[in-house]
Image: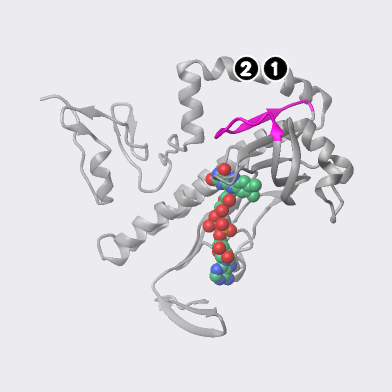
Amino acid sequence: FQDKGEAVIATLSQDGRTETVSAAYLAGCDGARSAVRHGLNIGFPGGTYEQSFYVADVKGSGEITPNGMDTTISSYGFAIVMPVRQSGSVRLIGIVPKAHEADETITFEAVRADVERDTGVKVHEVNWFSTYRVHHRVAERFRAGRVFLCGDAGHIHSPAGGQGMNTGMGDAVNLAWKLAAVVQGRADARLLDSYEPERIAFAHKLIESTDKVFRFVTSRSRLVGISRRYLMPKIMNVALHTSFGSRAFFGVISQAAIEYRAGPISAGTAGKVSGGDRLPYVVGARGDNFEPLRSLDWQVHVYGEV
Ligand SMILES: Cc1cc2nc3c(=O)[nH]c(=O)nc-3n(C[C@H](O)[C@H](O)[C@H](O)COP(=O)(O)OP(=O)(O)OC[C@H]3O[C@@H](n4cnc5c(N)ncnc54)[C@H](O)[C@@H]3O)c2cc1C
């Protein structure tokens, strides 16, 4: 692709057919190895964790919660057990033991004993087994001229907290309404300048927090292992049973706590609400104030007493 200033010319190839298109803008939603990011020469600084992870779809018996997800945090590390749709299989995710970390031809049998100990599942049949490394990186920029980066093309991090896809969708929504407004002539093109500062700031924050959680749950330090095993469950149990703790946790995991106060299109305050905040949820006599947001159009909301 080439950014010609007034349009982007891109060549698309599929099944031996090639097509050249001219578009006002290009969004690279092409994953961690993004050809668009490479094409723009945008760096992807960060690193790769030393641990390697396994994922296995198995049939087994033991500590399996039907239709639920179990996370085991032990002094060895952590493991997750969850059902694979309606297939009757369960998916096991965990850390590959250090002795097998560098083994590129690793099979399930090599780690069976560790997996069964960590997950509490006795495995009878292995349908799929794979290992992978986890990276933590944020692209230097999310935009160059008429070209944008969204999703894993712009940021990758540990799966701790399950935030990757959600963040990519957040990027896409943030960019989509702005592009639509600009392309339809309802907003100045400067509106697009707010995409990168809003989303890259959140990506950095996310990488920092998932990195802390990841290092804690995967650390091989004995002291951290003990606190993970004995201290953390108690702290989490107390924290999540307080209204403040559960609200804060929900805000982070659901990403409802994201705010763009420092962004270039946020200004002003009204009571406790600042420009760039998520609209507080209010239920009134005629329904709630989130219902009108389905229209995805500009709206003026007025609150108060008459
Ligand atoms: C083990 C694991 C667990 C995870 N769990 C969660 C979770 O619980 N919750 C969560 O939110 N996220 C989770 N994630 C992260 C999530 O999977 C990713 O963040 C998400 O899939 C990224 O979406 P994306 O569309 O940006 O990129 P991708 O999913 O990588 O999609 C990019 C697409 O672009 C296509 N493409 C690439 N190059 C080109 C090209 N040149 N031309 C045309 N097409 C191209 C690719 O084929 C692909 O289809 C997890 C990830 C892992 C590894």
Total number of numbered discs in the rendering: 2
- Looking at the image, is 169 positioned above or below residue 80? below
* Residue ranking furthest to the left: 306
| Residue toward you, 64 or 25 | 64
Name the spot of residue 295 as percent of width and height, x first: 25, 50
Tell me if mark 2 has few (under 14), some (14-19) or many (20+) residues whose alpha carbon lies within 10 angstroms of its own.
few
Q: Which quarter is ligand 1 in?
A: bottom right
Report the predominant secondary structure element of the magenta stretch.
Answer: loop
Name the spot of residue 241 as percent of width and height, x first: 51, 16
The magenta stretch spans residue 64: yes
Is residue 274 visible to us here? yes
- Looking at the image, is 39 positioned above or below residue 85? below
In the image: residue 231, left or right of residue 140: right
- Looking at the image, is 280 positioned above or below residue 198? above
Give the residue at x 56% y 33%: 68
Name the spot of residue 143 as percent of width and height, x first: 50, 61
Q: Which span of residues is magenta-colored?
A: 61-75
Snapshot quadrant of residue 5: bottom left
Secondary-structure class at tag 2: helix
Question: Do the residues bearing badges 2 and 1 touch, measured as CB atoms within 8 Å?
Answer: yes
| Residue toward you, 112 or 206 | 112
Snapshot quadrant of residue 75: top right
Q: Which residue is mark 1?
A: 231
Is residue 77 visible to us here? no
Secondary-structure class at tag 1: helix
Q: Which residue is mark 2?
A: 235
Give the residue at x 65% y 19%: 233
The magenta stretch spans residue 7: no
Snapshot quadrant of residue 274: top left
Name the spot of residue 261 as percent of width and height, x first: 40, 39
For badge 2, the amino acid type reads Ile
